[in-house]
Amino acid sequence: MPIKYPSARAGLEGAGGESAVAEVPEKVGVNPTNDQVSGLDALELAPRSDKGTLGKRIWRSAWPKLLAIAIVVLIWQIVVWSEWKPEYVLPGPKTVFTDLGDVITTGDFWDGVRLTLIRALTGFALAVIIGTAVGAAVSRFAPLRAAIGSLITGLQTMPSIMWFPLAILLFQISESAIMFVVIIGAAPSVANGLISGIDYVPRTWLRVGQVLGMKGLAKYRHLILPASLPSFISGLKQGWAFSWRSLMAGELLVIVPGALSIGVRMQQARDLSDSSLVICYIIVVLVIGILIDVLFNAADNALRKRWGLTGS
């Protein structure tokens, strides 16, 4: 009677007792080498692109901006040629850039830039501290969010110039009045950025942190805050934009005696009806804003690269 379930060896040897297992020839790739494993690992990564020399990379990044500047200057010159306004009201690019070259070579100009940047960085740093504390507290305590969550958004959308009459009544014509408006203009954006980032932390990560024993401050420090960094950086970027606009408005409205900042110099040029100098300071403010934006973009790109969200 045949065995219903022959053993594995009997099944391999066959009924006649002859070995039915053919000698398997050695195949290339059955035992992968280190080079093959490295090749498989490389499949998980984005293809490495040839970025070329540093000069080529800088040119690829700079030429779109230079082209945009050239288009704006060309349109500006066409408007001047059309004689829409007299040249003493709307001077041409050549006149403005000549005056700008003369202005930036003076020590007084750089003293004004230094004063404006000190105000901007000080106010923004205080706004980051206050906004981070408020955002963390609101995201942590549900009753606090119900009480002031909508108020933060309302403060964020409120025009900064509306705060200056109150700031002048509270602090008179002083640095404190400007700092008050800069902080109250930027802090809500920072707080909302952090709140949004914390809200979108995956619940799975929170459960993993709980399993690992993370509680209280350690949970925020090692899990929640790092996970919310992308939204937080966006909030910082938006907060800087609000603080920079608030500062420029403050320097035009609140002229502190002896503090010759960029805004004060622009106001003096307007009082003298010097349109060319006014446009010069507008360009300076624009360039500073662009440079700060480049720094924020560099930080954002570094974060995305660290998180594996870029192909480089």
Image (cartoon, grey):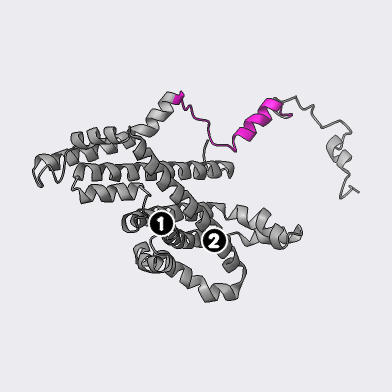
At mark 2, the secondary structure is helix
The answer, for residue 208, to whether it is visible in the render is no
Residue closest to the far right? 1
Residue pointed to by mark 2: 130
Q: Quadrant of residue 201?
A: bottom right
Residue 66 appears left or right of 61:
left
Residue marked by disc 1: 242
The residue depicted at 55 percent of the width and 72 percent of the height is 145
Q: Which residues are magenta?
A: 31-54
How far across and how far down the image is residue 171, in percent?
Answer: 43, 65
Which of 190/261 is in front?
261
Q: On screen, 299 above or below 63? A: below
Magenta span contains residue 32? yes
Q: Position of residue 275 (x, y in %)?
A: 19, 45
Give residue 273's position: percent from left, percent from top. Answer: 18, 48
Amino acid type of the residue that numbered disc 2 sits on in the rendered structure: Ile
